[in-house]
Image (cartoon, rainbow, N blue to C red):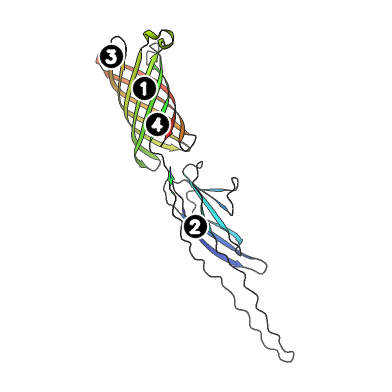
Amino acid sequence: MKRMIAVIVMLVSVLACVFAYEGTVTWTWYENDPKVEYYRYQVDAQNDDGWTVVDKYAYEVSIVLDVSVLHTLYLQQSYDGIIWSESSAADSEVFLEPEPVEEEPVPEEVVEPVEEPEEVVPEEPVEEVPEEPVEIYIPKNTVDVGFGYMNYIPDSAGAKNVGIVVSYSRPLFSWNVFDLGVKVNLALYANKNLILDIKNTVLTPYVDLMAQASFKVASSDIYLALGADASKILTEGTRYNLGLAAEIGVRYHRSEKFTVGFAVADHYYLLPLSQRMNRMDLKAFLSWAF
């Protein structure tokens, strides 16, 4: 994912009193990526258990602090509340307590009014120059590698097959949490003779070229794909089949680069007319995003 860090602007209002020089320090940040869903912040530390998490509608935090010393706010942002960006930091302004004004001694015989010391008003803090945003890396392409089980529907007594499936997905358009793109499946299945009678093994490869729509739910992607399907059964009399394929699946993000996924696909073959059939396969796979 491209790394992005929000711009932070620090505002300080100082409340001076007799016993402590404290003030309300306010940090404000601005949205720089509409896909960001969460922020978290921490003052003067970056401990794992010290973060305060807020949603994307929070844009400032106000804390009463000792303004005679420097304080630093660390801010991170996230798309899913699990993976966080690097920290952006902003320091507060330091205000020193005004020195007391010594009163001049007054002669005993002459009582003169003592001038009150002028109130020292802290200067307005200078707005800090925002740090250059660091972009969060956003994966664009996905390669799936996994295993599948295929059976004929509604004739479940037909040949049962297991095989290897490799897929490639690429989003072409993005809108909020939705992505639209293309998906290509390559698969090679074999019947049980692969183990029992390898000489009579029947191989069934297929290729799908589909349009894909996906959307994010927490740390997962759910996708739906639909398109053309071409297959052939490799026996003594090789037979080709053309039709349509539909697939629905989910990818669980285990890290920024790798996911675990499951999918179910239906293949309905229209040609040749004399060999119309319907097959379904179940797939489990690992994905690599780049």
Q: Amino acid at mark 3?
A: Arg
Foreground mark, 4 or 2? 4
Residue at image x 36%, y 18%? 279
Please tell me which of labels 1 and 3 falls first in the chain: 1
Compare residues 112 and 3 and report the one nearer the observer: 3
Residue 238, above or below 253? above
Mark in the foreground, 4 or 3: 4
Asked which secondary structure carries label 2, the reply is strand
Q: Find residue 101 and report its image quarter.
A: bottom right
Numbered mark located on residue 239 in the image: 3
**Figure quadrant of the C terminus:** top left
Q: Which residue is mark 2?
A: 28
Q: How many other residues sit within 10 Å of disc 3, few (<14), some (14-19) or many (≥20)?
A: few
Kindly identify which residue carries mark 1.
187
Name the spot of residue 76 as percent of width and height, x first: 51, 49
Q: Secondary structure at mark 1?
A: strand
Q: Secondary structure beneath disc 4?
A: strand
For marks 2 and 1, give the CA distance: 52 Å
Disc on res. 143? 4
For mark 1, does the 10 Å Cα neighbourhood hold few (<14), some (14 to 19), or many (20 or more) residues?
Answer: some
Nearer the N terminus, badge 1 or badge 4?
A: 4
Horizontal relation, residue 20 to residue 85: left or right? right
Q: Secondary structure at mark 3?
A: strand
Q: Position of residue 197 (x, y in %)?
A: 41, 7
Could you tell whether 288 is left or right of 180 in the image? Answer: right
Q: Position of residue 259 (x, y in %)?
A: 46, 32
